[in-house]
Amino acid sequence: MLKTVLLVLIAMSIPISAFAEPMIELATTQSEIHSLDSVLVTGKITDVATFKPLTLTVISPDGETVYAPQISFDKDGIFKRLFHPTLPSFKDGTYTVIASHPDAEKTAEIQFTVIGSTIPPKGIPVKSSDSGIISTKPSVITLSADTEFGSDRILVSGSTTSSITDITLIVTSPQGNLVSIAQITPDNTGKFSLEMKSGGPLWKENGFYTITANQGLSSEHKQSIKVEIDNGVVVPEFGAIAVMILAVAIVSIIAVSAKSRLSIMPRL
């Protein structure tokens, strides 16, 4: 009985503050970047449900939310995210990154400043230390597109050797105009997929559209494929002319077969 009373008194003497509250830490080593640079955000979160992702919200200098991905963290609460420039580039000014989680009342916040463009003025050549050198390294990204003739759905899928950094998918028209951009996270095995829908004013050009997958800052982390679009829908790889030739061939075979049957019928 005395032991029970002592245990109750000890439990009552423990202050409520002894229970840990969820905490989020956020950091970046890139406090100043150029408009075409990417920025790496790292952090740590503790005492929250591990199956619930946290949200990183990036707010531009004019108050617009440009990114708000939900990301997971490891068993130690460590997470990181590489944010690529918005199209066509980051705006000059100060961006704010806010980390939040459903189990945490408080958020964490950092800022980085875009100090200007890295694009040189016209007429000034860009110097490159590897000018004239062609890389022979194979791309670490594989990319494919599953389509059906006459469909407006394009399933883009692929794999990468790194599951940490997001994949940015950019679609450009036959004339090089930007059609669509999306950012997806590979799974633990490095696989990723995204369904795109063609049609509408951005897909009005007929011809081959280029789908490019980029990952990180390394040039070899890049792969492209082409999909032919006609009147907003997918054209098979062998083309419309081949379809017409095949149709004519089938009709000819049917006609010859019918004529042959008539020629061998006995006369009455």
Image: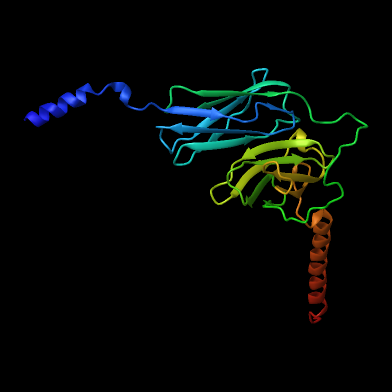
Say left or right for 30 vs 2.
right
Residue at (81%, 76%) from the top-left corner? 260
Residue situated furthest top in the rendering: 62
Residue at (81%, 53%) from the top-left corner? 240
Establish if 68 lies above or below 170: above
Name the image quarter holding the C terminus.
Answer: bottom right
The quarter of the picture where residue 37 lies is: top right
- Residue 198 in sight here: no
Most foreground residue, 258 or 186: 186
Most foreground residue, 237 or 135: 135
Establish if 93 lies above or below 140: above
Residue at (84%, 61%) from the top-left corner? 245
Image label count: 0
Color style of the picture: rainbow
Establish if 8 lies above or below 238: above
Residue 29 location, x and y as percent? 62, 31
Residue at (51%, 24%) from the top-left corner? 108
Say left or right for 75 vs 84.
left
Most foreground residue, 25 or 163: 25
- Residue 82 in sight here: yes
Residue 186 location, x and y as percent? 58, 45
Residue 21 location, x and y as percent? 38, 26
Residue 136 location, x and y as percent? 77, 56
Name the image quarter holding the N terminus.
Answer: top left
Residue situated furthest right in the rendering: 123
Establish if 244 lies above or below 36: below
